Amino acid sequence: MSDVTPQTTGAGQGDDWSLFRNRQVPQMVRLDVALEHGAYQGLKKALAEYTPEQVTQIVIDASLLGRGGAGFPAGRKWSFIPKAPGQKYLTVNADESEPGTFSNRELMETDPHQLIEGIALCCYAVGISQAFIYIRGEYVYAADQLDRAIAEARAGGYLGPNILGSDYSLEVFVFRGAGAYICGEESALLESIEGNRPMPRSRPPFPAVVGLYGRPTVINNVETICNVPRIVFKGADWYKTLGTPTSPGTKVYSISGHVRRPGNYELPLGTTLRELIYEHAGGVPGDRAVKAVLPSGAAAPWIPGDQLDLPLDYDNPKKVGTILGSASVIVMDETVSIPHATLRLTEFFRHESCGKCTPCREGTMWLEKTMERICAGEGVPGDLDLLIDVCSKINGRVLCALGDFAVSPIQSSLKFFRHEYEALIPGLAPVREPELVAADK
Amino acid sequence: MPLAPDTIAEIERIRAALPNTRSALLPALKAAQREQGWLPRETMAEVAERLDLDPNAAYMLATFYTMLHTEPVGHYHLEVCRSLPCYLLGCDAVIEALKERLGVELGEVSADGLFSVQIGECLGDCPHAPMMRVNDDYVGPLAPDTIGELLEILRARAGERVRGLAADPADGPPPNEGPLHYSNAIDARPLSTVRE
Ligand SMILES: Cc1cc2nc3c(=O)[nH]c(=O)nc-3n(C[C@H](O)[C@H](O)[C@H](O)COP(=O)(O)O)c2cc1C
Ligand code: FES
């Protein structure tokens, strides 16, 4: 189906246009090395042949869907930015703090110029002269790579004033965060750059109209932007030969948990969960059975282990009540205690709730307390109904999706594994036959 | 302790590179912490004052972000990941082993001032689970029975280059040694592990 394979080395060679084509090339941060491996070809082509509107149109035609979670079409997002002159911004979302997500990190560490070229193309298309990369503070190495690559790109005329002799100018600033999951939420991210406590804004107005410093702002994920150079260079028709008709292109799937070869695998969209787990990630250690899979880190509803033939694209997961999200797949084998694993996720959301809206702040606290006592064997029979009730009072009543994310592990684990909770709650645990209890001893 | 001239120069550089002074606050606090190890109140106030901001603006950020420290930390600050992928691979036993070896509770500094331990959420290095952050570097996979040896190596290296503190080279982590695996080393590409 595609000419893209994840493990390729040596690049710009032949038909290899995977995002990771240069991941094994040493010193890709250096401009000379990057140029040798095909960097900035898309930018050169755009400046020579296309108007900004044409670049946006190519990205629209390619149906590039946002890779940060929501899957919103990138070209359409760009087209919402008012055409009137005046300051506008791009902020690239490199906060990447969803548990199980590590694809942006490897894209930035191994091929920083690919991201910079994508930024230059987006900014050319939208008419932006100042871009930010908002990178989580823990990614020191990736941020250092970006700073160095930006300096070299600027010295080489690929950034800065009058790029490649044109009248188009662009500055890029790497803004380093300091440890807060909420900063990945786009409006909290803007607050963080503005030097405020990073709490989400209520919308409307949307960032395309009132964004950073009150100006129209594009916000895209790292992987979304990394796709732009090859789309512009190779064209929308080429791009649509990858993936499925409604989810074109490749996705970097991050897979972790109980697999033999955890890591990033760039595969055509629509690859099944089974292929990802068994062919690419080497299957489950000890050949144990898969109990459940989290398709998008902590945030999205789960997929039970008997539904591994699900194609991972933007449509099919919706049919089973979940989403592709950031495609950070966490695999749990049959040895896992589902309530305990769920508690880990609930603790995460309670810790990361920014505290701005009451249902999320108070709700995640009560979810955690209830889950804790269930896991400690101190639950009471009404606790499962209580969990469901608290979830329903958070879901949809919050300013950003963090609260909605927080309820999904509880709701889906209760849907598929309710018996595991019941077994932990005195009074709900199935009464066992005396001879079975005796046999255990 | 007033900020060193290098730190002040760095803050001015950041301020000049950003469209808005308040945006320089977070990077400036990080620069101050890099120099002083943590953020005493006077330091926060000095940073805010340099940027013509209320000290409260600095305090508001310092108390929100996990990477900003309002209490002293060790020469090596260890942030051990506890999120689900690391949990599935046994991070809880690693955290217990660390606390026991160092004789500290979470948030405390070891008696020799060398180590502090904090738990953190997913650091984006799950292929190397269970893992931790050691100042600016990532170390993993970890195991409870090699933690002691790993701490000994760090202790022996405390006088050498340690990233994440003042005057450190920015060109990647120091070399691997024994059970000390820096997973953000350039030779750790691609980002993956093989497990059985
Ligand atoms: C709590 C929360 C955390 C998020 N974290 C990230 C993140 O780390 N990276 C990211 O790209 N998007 C994240 N998002 C989604 C962003 O808000 C936004 O939709 C995305 O960056 C848009 O980029 P895209 O259209 O290219 O996908 C998060 C959303 C929420 C609600
Ligand atoms: S869960 Fe520990 S690094 Fe991701």
Image (tube, coloured by chain):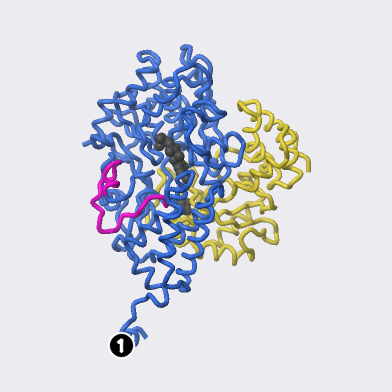
Q: Position of residue B119 (x, y in %)?
A: 56, 56
| Front-most of residues A30 and B120 | B120
Identity of the amino acid at label 1? Glu
Q: Seen in the image, is B58 located left or right of residue B122?
A: right
Give SS at disc 1. helix
For label 1, count other residues whose C-alpha is less than 10 Å away and answer few (under 14), some (14-19) or many (20+).
few
Q: Position of residue A379 (x, y in %)?
A: 46, 71
Chain of the residue under label 1: A
Q: Which residues are magenta?
A: A298-319
Q: Is residue A439 visible to us here?
A: yes
Q: What residue is at 57 percent from the left and 62 percent from the top?
A: B98
Q: Seen in the image, is B32 located left or right of residue A374?
A: right
Q: What residue is at 46 percent from the left and 28 percent from the top?
A: A208
Q: Colour of chain A?
A: blue
Q: What residue is at 30 percent from the left and 84 percent from the top?
A: A433
Q: Position of residue A393 (x, y in %)?
A: 45, 55
Q: Colour of chain B?
A: yellow
Q: Seen in the image, is B41 located left or right of residue A175?
A: right
Q: Is residue A367 rendered magenta in the image? A: no
Q: Is residue B178 visible to us here?
A: no
| Front-most of residues A119 and A206 | A206
Q: Position of residue B72 (x, y in %)?
A: 70, 52
